[in-house]
Image (spheres, rainbow, N blue to C red):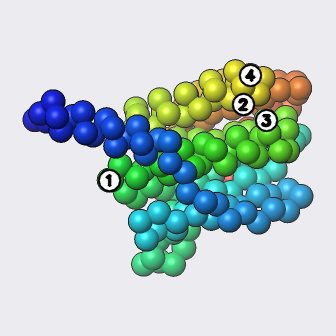
Amino acid sequence: MLSYIDFKSLLEKASSSLSTTYPIKWVTKPNEWVGLFNCEDNIYQISIKDIKHNMWASKFYFYNKETKEFEINKTNLNSISRFAIFRTIDIANIEFLETINPNGMVFTATDNSRGRKMLYDRFSLSVKDKLGYEYITEYDEDIDAQIYILYKDIDLNSVTDAVSEFIKSF
């Protein structure tokens, strides 16, 4: 059991980590943004691709040094740095949305982590308030993931069409 002092120290580290971001090296093309960053000797990739109807998919990858491939994965860290990684992804997605101003963005939580889903909900609500996107989320049994959808200036049939295309990529 954590003592009060240990718990307070943990909260201070988490708070500090949530305000930390890692520099991203971007490669941009008309229909794709790819960003790489490092944390604790690990390499991470953010891939944002145009799906359809100016709706974009944001995916996060961890570089597996054993297989030498990027894998859709959690941060692969148990340290407090995972909060800084989330914050880096958060800032990257907002930078993308502000720069491109797409009709929407789709992303997923592919695990059962309540904490991750709470962070994704918080991010989505922040984007809704700050950038004027509508926000919906639902669980998809076919891909066993919670899907988060941000959209604006687009009809729901087009959103559904783009999300269906996104689900096929799993």
Compare marks 1 and 4 and give the one earlier in the sequence. 1
Please tell me which residue is depicted at 32% across the width and 53% down the height of the picture.
78
How far apart, in angstroms, are the residues tagged by discs 3 and 2? 5 Å
Compare marks 4 and 2 and give the one earlier in the sequence. 4
How far apart, in angstroms, are the residues tagged by discs 4 and 2? 6 Å
Q: Are marks 4 and 2 in contact (CB under 8 Å)?
A: yes
Residue 63: percent from left, percent from top: 51, 69
Compare marks 1 and 3 and give the one earlier in the sequence. 1
User: Which residue bears the numbered disc 3?
Assistant: 104
Name the amino acid type tagged 4.
Glu
User: Which residue bears the numbered disc 2?
Assistant: 150
User: Which residue bears the numbered disc 1?
Assistant: 78
Mark 1 or 3: the one toward you: 1
Disc 3: CA contacts within 10 A as few (<14), some (14-19) or many (>=20): many
| Res 134 label | 4
How far apart, in angstroms, are the residues tagged by discs 3 and 4? 9 Å
161 w.r.t. 60: above or below:
above
Image quadrant occupied by the N terminus: top left
